[in-house]
Image: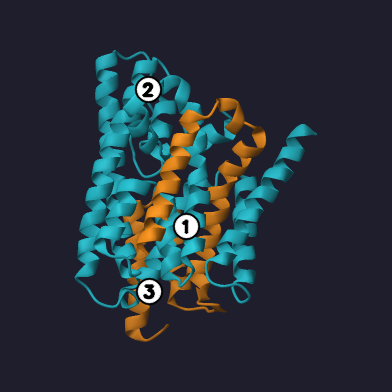
Amino acid sequence: MAQRDTEVFDVLLRYGDSVPPVATSQTPGSDRRRIQGKAISIGIATGAYALSFGAISVSTGLTVWQTQTLSLFMFTGASQFAFVGIVGAGGGLVAAVLTAWLLGARNAMYAVSLAPRLDLRGWRRLVGAQSTIDESTAMALAHPEPESTSRYAFWATAAWIYLLWNLGTLVGALGAAAIGDPNDLGLDAATAAALLALLWPRLVDRSMWATALAAAAVAVVLTPVLQPGLPVLAAALVAVAAARISGRRETR
Amino acid sequence: MWIAVLAASLGCYAEKLLGYLVPASVLESRAFRQISGLMPVALLAALVAVQTFAAGMALTLDARVAALGVAIVALMLRAPFLVVVLLAGITAAGLRMLGWAT
């Protein structure tokens, strides 16, 4: 696991909950209780932003069922917000799908680092795959020893988030379905803020800031010349370029 | 719309599963790791920019810019996610209601 990844996990963990860092030399029982408590608090926090996802999604024109399908089967927040954001901005569906996929690619990398410690077989692997998201990965990696505790942290976090993320989505979607013109309520601005809040904890160093600013600039500059949705996809190339630059710097 | 919802969902699930199925060496190349680490940053930043400044294919400065400013301040004060989102929504809705911005 690269140093930068663990830093990002650290920040993801610290962000939005005030639980102090885990102390060592505790009995397994109290370890599990503390992990359970932290998993619940992370679950409640993500459930709260599922409320805004459900509301935003329905206000962009998806039905309650389509919104719920995204939370049940896609189950990766950034991709879901991106998908409905692009649909809401009048972007093509192909662009929305591609952006969701590109954002989900990091989950494959999480799975690679989790695979040896989770050691999943058969149907557990199918469930474990769906459980592989930012928060569960961060919790599993934050409690590396012993492996059973790491596994416990992964499953507890994933279970609470899955439950509360879907519940929050449903409540938010039903709530938004009951009200009128979404832009009067500032839901377009709320979408921008939600995406920014997902970005914020990842801006841990100068290269992340540089990547973010360059990508934002590319998207803005291309907005008047490309169909909605495509400027965001074009900004994905910034990530490829930035990886090349930092790769070259490391080999030097 | 259903096709897009299902395609996007299945694709994102397949990516997660892929990480468990393929040998680690395939995905653990440094290039893939770096790109997939930077990809969320680039895409989310681009989405924030477009969601704030674009209206279709036009660029505008409207209530969303002020709302984003409020969101940035809230994030710097370490406000929880839902508070950030609500404050931004309220800011934009309030400015529009007062007729100070579109």
Spot the orange chain and give its letter.
B
Colouring convention used in this rendered image of the protein? by chain
Element assignment for label 2: loop
| Quadrant containing the N terminus of chain A in the rendered view | top right
Spot the cyan chain and give its letter.
A
Estimate the x, y position of residue A2 in percent, counting from the top left.
59, 30
The residue tagged 2 is A121
The residue tagged 3 is B92
Identify the chain of the residue marked 3, using the numbered disc in the image: B
| Quadrant containing the C terminus of chain A in the rendered view | top right
Can you tell which of label 3 and label 2 is closer to the viewer? Answer: 2
Q: Which mark is residue A97?
A: 1
Q: Residue at x 43, y 67 (%)?
A: A87
Q: Residue at x 36, y 38 (%)?
A: A130
Q: Which mark is residue A48?
A: none
Work out how far the residue at label 3 is from the one at label 2, CA to CA, in angstroms.
49 Å
Estimate the x, y position of residue B29 in percent, counting from the top left.
64, 32
Q: Quadrant of residue A151?
A: top left
Q: Amino acid at mark 3?
A: Ala
Work out how far the residue at label 1 is from the one at label 2, CA to CA, in angstroms.
29 Å
Q: Earlier in the sequence, mark 1 or mark 2?
A: 1
Element assignment for label 1: helix
Work out how far the residue at label 3 is from the one at label 1, CA to CA, in angstroms.
28 Å
Badge 2: few (under 14), some or many (20 or more) residues near its Cα, within 10 Å?
few
User: Farthest front residue?
Assistant: B3
In this rendered view, identify the residue nearer to me: B61 or B11. B11
* Residue contact between numbered discs 3 and 1, judged by CB atoms under 8 Å: no
Q: Amino acid at mark 2?
A: Arg
Q: Quadrant of residue A126?
A: top left
